[in-house]
Image (spheres, rainbow, N blue to C red):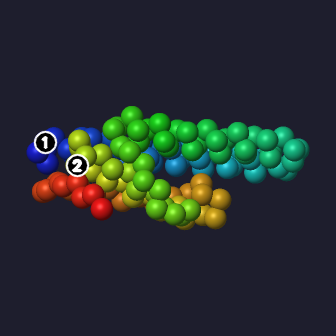
Amino acid sequence: MGSDELDPIVLEIMATLDNLLLAEMQARFQVSALEAQEYPLAATFEMVRDMEADAALDEALSGFGFEQHALDDDAELWISDELGLMVFLFFTASDGRSYTYRIVRFEVVGEDEISL
C-alpha cells in the first residue's frame, strides 16, 4: 500500500479517535450536572459510560484491523500489519478517560520466528 493510499485511512482513524474523546468529554459534563442534583444516579451513569467508552475505543480500532498490545496501565499500543500503522494511546488522566495519541506508519522489512 502506497503512502497516498494511507492518508485517507489515517485521517479517518484520527477523526474517529477525536470523536470518541469528544463524546467522553461530553459525558463528563453530563456526570458533573447529575452530581449537582443526585449523586447516586451520577455514579451509576459514570460507571456505565466508562464501560461504553472502553468498548467504543476497542471496537473502533479493531474495526480498522488493529490488534491491541497493552503496555501498562497508562498506555496501549494498537498495531495493524495490514495497514502498516501503529496507534499509541497514552492516557493522561488518572481515571484513564483522557488520552493523547500518536499514529506511526511502518514497513515490515523482515520477519522470523525464533524458538528457545
On the image, the x and y values in percent for residue 100 come to 46, 60
Q: Which residue carries the number 1 mark?
A: 1
Q: Is residue 10 visible?
A: no
Tell me the crowding category of disc 1: few under 14, some 14 to 19, or many 20 or more residues within 10 angstroms, Cα based. few
Q: Where is residue 61 in the image (x, y as percent from the top left)?
A: 41, 42
Tell me: 36 left or right of 23.
Answer: right
Query: In screen coordinates, is 58 left or right of 27?
Result: left
- Name the residue located 30 percent from the left edge and 62 percent from the top edge: 116
Label 1 secondary element? loop
Specify the amino acid type for callout 1.
Met
Looking at the image, which is closer to me, 7 or 56?
56
- Kindly identify which numbered label has been placed on residue 60: none
The correct choice, above or below, for 9 with respect to 73 in the image is above
Q: Do the residues labelled 2 and 1 touch (CB within 8 Å)?
A: yes
Q: Residues within 10 Å of mark 2 (few under 14, many from 20)?
A: some
Q: Which of 42 and 65 is in front in this view?
A: 65
Q: How far apart are marks 2 and 1 (CA)?
A: 8 Å
* Residue 73, horizontal then vertical, whole percent: 56, 62
Numbered-mark total: 2
Q: In this view, does 57 lie above or below 91?
A: above
Residue nearest the viewer, comparing 43 with 34: 43
Is residue 104 placed above or below 55 in the rendered structure? below
78 lies left or right of 24: left
In the image, taking residue 3 as reference, residue 36 lies left or right, namely right
Residue identified by numbered label 2: 84
Q: Position of residue 110 (x, y in %)?
A: 14, 56
Q: Residue at x 27, y 41 (%)?
A: 9
Residue lying at 80% horizontally and 46% vertically, measured from the top left: 43
Residue beneath the point at 14% across and 48% down: 3
Mark 2 element type? loop
